[in-house]
Image: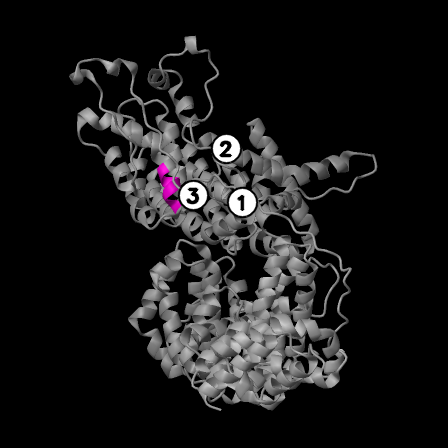
Amino acid sequence: MHYGQLNDFYKSKTEILKNSPSLDDFEQIITEFALSPSHVIPSVECIRTFSVLIGTTIPEFYHIIKQDGKLLRRLHLMIASLPGISVVVSIIGQDSEALLKFPQDDYVRNRLLCLLDILLLALSPGILDVLYRQVNGTTKEQLYMQDIMSLFVGSRLISTIAYARQALNDTEEQPWWWISEGGKMSDFVANELANSSGISNSQKYLAKFVSRCLNLGYSNTVFERLLNKSAFHVLRITNEMSSLDLSSFIKNFLHYLRSEFLKESAEQDYVNCSSTVLFELIPPTQSRNVIKILVQQGIGTQPLHRAVALWLVSHGIHAKMFESLLRQWGDSLFIKYTSLTRQEVYTELIFLLLTHIEKFTIHKISQEPFYLEAISNRLQAMSGRARIMGMGVAKAINLSDQSGIPLDFNEVDEFNESYKKWNSLMMSTDRIIDLENVWPLLQSKAVKPFIDRDYNKLLPDLIDDNAIVAKSGQLDADSDDEEFPAYAITDEDSEDSDDDPTMRAQKILPPVYLIDLIKYLGEPDAKTALPRQKVALENASGIILRKMNYGSELSSSSKELATILCGLKNTYDLPNFENQKMDALVALVITVPETVGSHFAENITFGDYSMQEKLMMMSAIAIGAQHLAGKSTYNFGIKGSLSLFASKLLPDSAHMRFAAPQDVSLSFLGVGEVENAVGLIQKTALQDSITKATDDLSTEAKVLRISARLLNERQRESKPGLVQTRSRLAKIAGMYMFFPLAAHWRYFLASVSKNSFAPMLVAHYIKTLAVIVDASFPLAHDITDMSMELFDILSTIKRDISEANILEAILTAVLVTIQVNDETTLISTFGKELIDIKDFLDLNWEAITDKNVHSLAAGVLIKIGQLLAQHQRRLIGAFNV
């Protein structure tokens, strides 16, 4: 039947359906559509006919169709087509929307339930193969396959049925509910692909189906269904994937192997099986991509690293990758800016590959300039852990080469323990095994198909006419939000209203763009500099916050603006100068922390700034971290007021210059707000210890208490909108705030050593680092790395009891580290440092004269004492070997 005849066929059937067809007419139409494949190819006329048939006629005859098995099967054959399913889904969406608006409409409700049953009937086993055979070989095959994928591995089916569930508002589970659940829909599609005999022959479409199914977000469910002997052929389609799809496939597959088979305590058999599967699926051209995903996604475990290393060896590309990893591992920028966790992954991979490298190649590499430079960079690193990694690799290559002077780092703390762990990797006997031997170990559990092939049992009884009417809420449509808030117009003093135009002050409008703000702050003309700087400071924080989500203007101007603000002096004795300057600095940290955090860290260390300006930059970073974490909200504007009567005060500018200048100026440098945050951290951290000490002294029955840390976490989780801000800070706190400050610590210490305000600066620096770590807890993935750096910094500070503020900062940092790390990490990683701190406090207990520091030291001793008492045996074994 050619195109014109087919259109005439559709038109004739549409006319019959519109004119109240008899049961015989209806049965004839259903039969013709069911038995003729050419009648179910999508077209404009076909969709129009199906719309009338499915939207009107089938619901009217549905009670008869349910009782006739033959007619039910014909209906299934007709609906199990691309136009059939597409029209059903489209009408379900329209009815759901109508039911939400008019929940009392029983006709729409019953038709919606009828169509949902019909859709369930269409999604029987083998539906993907049926649809593929219908469109295969047609002129628009590729376009039709895109529509099929949009239905099953896109969002159409899932979102439409979820919308229907909302409209029906039925609490009792229905047979079609699983269609709206992404996990079950992913499992259904994976099962379809596993049992396919049509799509599986077309690698191009199969690859697209698998990729888009993984993108639904339930990759483990998909791999659980397909990683077995009978379905493994479905996964062998990586050569047909685009580079983007292949990267997603590799990432999801590594996640699955890690979560199911390659956890920390995984046996060697699982490593061998996983390597074999990787060898079968991932081509060697993806070696760099695999390493990149392994490191950047932070999904690595030692067994997974072993499996990847064995995969590289099995493809014969291990020597090339070994040299590449070694070059990047020893790069000075990599050492300085990459987290220690990622550096550990590179170190483990180097050790794993080293055992497979020939001695001739090792000798050649050991003589290369890049290798010598890499070890040199490592040994000069600021981080002690980074230096130990360099010692370990140098010793391992030296032992493998056996041509130079033997290296020995046994006198370095923690080296022997770390090297022992790395050296054990070289002793592993992992190997690729035969694919047939993989399945008994990796065989995934069988999941039952969703749909029974006995179509007469598929459909439940239709609901009666007295169905419960769903309740639906109404959305408020009124909104008075303005896209562009009005700028305030500044008024000058009343004396400017003089009739003489030469005496009238020029009105300075607030800057609209950041480039105008920068010009105002750096105005060279002495006549207009004062009013422009005044207006600029009054509006700076507001402009910065408004520009946060508009284009790239803020990111491109942030460094220049930060530099100007940091060095801005109160030349004209402007009132509230420090407040407004701090507002602008905090606004920059909140809006562009990725740029400003590291920029402030460099300015604090290497910039030619005063003590007050450095304190302001530290405070801005700490306050910004607290604000981004949702732990405290920074109030932009004039903060606080002096407690003296106005008649007793000089004008603001004179008062700040003459009346207790140091105390007053510090109150405007953000130091007070950072101290408040530190005080809250101390109070929260010591709450458990104080409670325990009180309970120990009490003779009354003890009451079960909830950990203050757990209580705080619950309260934070209950706050609306907190998860989003916490997630943002967790991703950036380490890389853009903490590590830049930590990296510049030694240079900072040297630059302020002769400064009379050095104790104040050092204490504020440590407290700033502690506040960042506390704010990033618990979602940051590099908490342990930050804690290690923080302890390294504390070890470089001379602990002078007479400097109470420095000792307070050290104790606060210790408390934060204890709070944000679990007990196992504390004992295994920081056990020695905790013992040293305890010994120091015990030795100098009587010499601590400051009351607040004395109380804080007592709390730290209690916390450390509790940890050491609970893990005494482990510590004895660790330090007395």
Q: Secondary structure at mark 2?
A: helix
Magenta residues (range) = 543-548
> In 3D space, how far apart are the residues under numbered discs 2 and 3 (Cα atoms)?
19 Å
Magenta part, dominant SS: helix
Nearer the observer: mark 1 or 2; the answer is 1
Earlier residue among tags 2 and 3? 3
Q: Amino acid at mark 3?
A: Ile
Pointer 3: what residue?
A: 590
Q: Residue visible at 30% across and 29% down? A: 535
Q: Residue visible at 39% across and 59% down? A: 335
Kindly identify which numbered label has been placed on residue 97. Answer: none
Q: Is residue 134 above or below residue 680?
A: below
From the viewer's perspective, tell me whether residue 592 is left or right of residue 41. left
Q: Residue visible at 44% across and 82% down? A: 140
Q: Residue 329 location, x and y as percent?
A: 39, 66
Hey, which residue is sitting farthest top in the picture?
A: 647
Given residues 801 and 373, the one toward you in this image is 373
Pointer 1: what residue?
A: 477
> In 3D space, how far apart are the residues under numbered discs 1 and 3 (Cα atoms)?
32 Å
Q: Secondary structure at mark 1?
A: loop
Pointer 2: what residue?
A: 675
Q: Amino acid at mark 2?
A: Glu
